[in-house]
């Protein structure tokens, strides 16, 4: 079966031509799919015979919103999407003064095992296809009834562990015939997969690279982020410097503030030292207080920010959205999994 949603307009045109159809049919189908069609029967400007042929030879995998939480505080919306194979992923719709942002998942589950993240429950199940990545944007926009202007790949999964599909997604979402969301409006987050960072550097995409740092020293980082054993933080900083030299793009460093773990002044000083010679932005994230977790929110976020700024490092504290819902990555999926098991 052909996965049309993961095809470019040119590929879709060739697929339709191979079926004996004129070239313009490919553009029509592409437009329907990127407009949120959930079945071939909806494509009313296609002949019935073609719709039946597409039904027999191609697959559509529109997600179903099995849960939806809406924040009464700020309008943030959390979606739990069920995929065609029964697996679930999450997306979050957020309103900002500069436009509407959707945070999307790149995998079902995650292999990285970060100690403070709920996304790693049951490990990695599988990669999402380019079409499944795209569907999160399309159907979030369709449900919200508002245009999406910004995309953050910071949901469940590690984007650079699914890089080929992510790159195709970026190509599709950037298509003028589709959603036409520019690269400068897209952020991609990684926990530090160095080969993926180097590949992105070679491509010189105009997206924003976000690195989930969470500790500047190897000992601390290895305790909370197993990826540090494969790609040590010293090598990660070096890769970030090479990325900046190649692309000229500033990197954003994500930093979850954990009480007594990574919030010491010496760690702020070390961050400043490692970023010297490279413009970087440190985004301090107030940790969610999860009852089951041994990690608690730091009480030193303001002091840590001030310490970074004293070294000339740009540091901000992430605005907390969806405080009255399960807006943190992986929480809603975890609850659904527990309910299915009868926990």
Image (cartoon, rainbow, N blue to C red):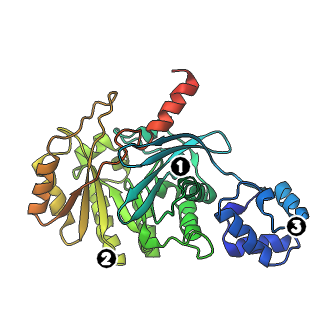
The residue that appears at 59% across and 68% down in the rendered structure is 172
Q: Are marks 2 and 1 in contact (CB under 8 Å)?
A: no
Left-right relation of 225 to 144: left
Select label 2 or label 1 by which is in front.
1
Frontmost of labels 3 and 2 is 3
Cα distance, mark 3 to mark 1?
Answer: 36 Å
Query: In the rendering, at what x and y percent does residue 152 appear?
Result: 43, 59
Residue 317 x, y percent position in the rendering: 23, 54
Quarter occupied by the N terminus: bottom right
Badge 3 or badge 2: first in the primary sequence:
3
Looking at the image, which residue is at 37% across and 64% down? 209
Pick the front one: 174 or 106: 174
Residue 107: mark in rendering: 1
- Give SS at disc 2: helix
Splitting the image into 4 quarters, where does residue 132 fall? Answer: bottom right
- 283 horizontally vs 87: left or right: left
- Camera-side residue of 148 and 61: 148
Q: Would residue 152 be visible to someone looking at this image?
A: no
Q: Position of residue 335 (x, y in %)?
A: 48, 31
Question: Mark 3 highlights which residue?
Answer: 47
Q: Nearer the viewer, residue 283 or 51?
A: 51
**What secondary structure is marked by label 3?**
loop
Residue sticking out furthest to the left: 310
Q: Which residue is mark 2?
A: 245
Task: Report which quarter residue 177 is drawn in.
Answer: bottom right
Bin the neighbour count of mark 2 within 10 Å (Cα to Cα): few under 14, some 14-19, many 20 and up: few
């Amino acid at each position: 079966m052909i996965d049309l949603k993961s095809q470019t307009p040119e590929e879709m045109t060739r697929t339709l031509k191979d079926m004996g159809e004129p070239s313009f049919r490919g553009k029509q189908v592409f437009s329907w799919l990127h407009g949120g069609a959930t079945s071939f029967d909806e494509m009313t400007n296609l002949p019935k015979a073609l719709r039946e042929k597409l039904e027999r030879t191609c697959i559509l995998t529109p997600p179903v919103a099995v849960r939806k939480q809406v924040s009464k505080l700020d309008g943030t919306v959390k979606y739990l999407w069920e995929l065609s194979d029964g697996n679930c992923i999450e997306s979050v719709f957020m309103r900002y003064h500069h436009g509407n942002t959707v945070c999307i998942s790149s995998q079902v589950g995650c292999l990285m095992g970060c100690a403070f993240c709920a996304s790693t429950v049951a490990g990695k199940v599988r990669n999402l296809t380019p079409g499944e990545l795209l569907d999160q944007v399309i159907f979030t926009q369709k449900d919200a009834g508002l245009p999406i202007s910004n995309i953050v790949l910071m949901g469940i999964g590690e984007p650079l562990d699914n890089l080929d599909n992510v790159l195709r997604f970026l190509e599709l979402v950037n298509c003028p015939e589709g959603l036409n969301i520019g690269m400068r409006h897209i952020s991609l987050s990684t926990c530090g997969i160095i080969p993926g960072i180097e590949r992105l550097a070679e491509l010189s995409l105009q997206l924003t690279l976000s690195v989930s740092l969470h500790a500047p020293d190897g000992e601390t980082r290895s305790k909370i982020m197993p990826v540090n054993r494969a790609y040590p933080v010293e090598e990660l900083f070096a890769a970030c410097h090479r990325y900046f030299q190649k692309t000229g793009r500033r990197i954003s460093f994500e930093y979850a503030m954990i009480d007594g773990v990574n919030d010491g002044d010496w760690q702020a000083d070390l961050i400043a030292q490692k970023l010297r010679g490279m413009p970087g932005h440190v985004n301090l994230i107030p940790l969610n207080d999860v009852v089951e977790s041994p990690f608690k929110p730091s009480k030193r976020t303001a002091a840590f920010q001030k310490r970074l700024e004293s070294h000339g490092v740009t540091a901000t504290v992430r605005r907390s959205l969806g405080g009255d819902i399960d807006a943190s990555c992986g929480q809603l999926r975890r609850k659904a999994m527990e309910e299915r098991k009868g926990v």
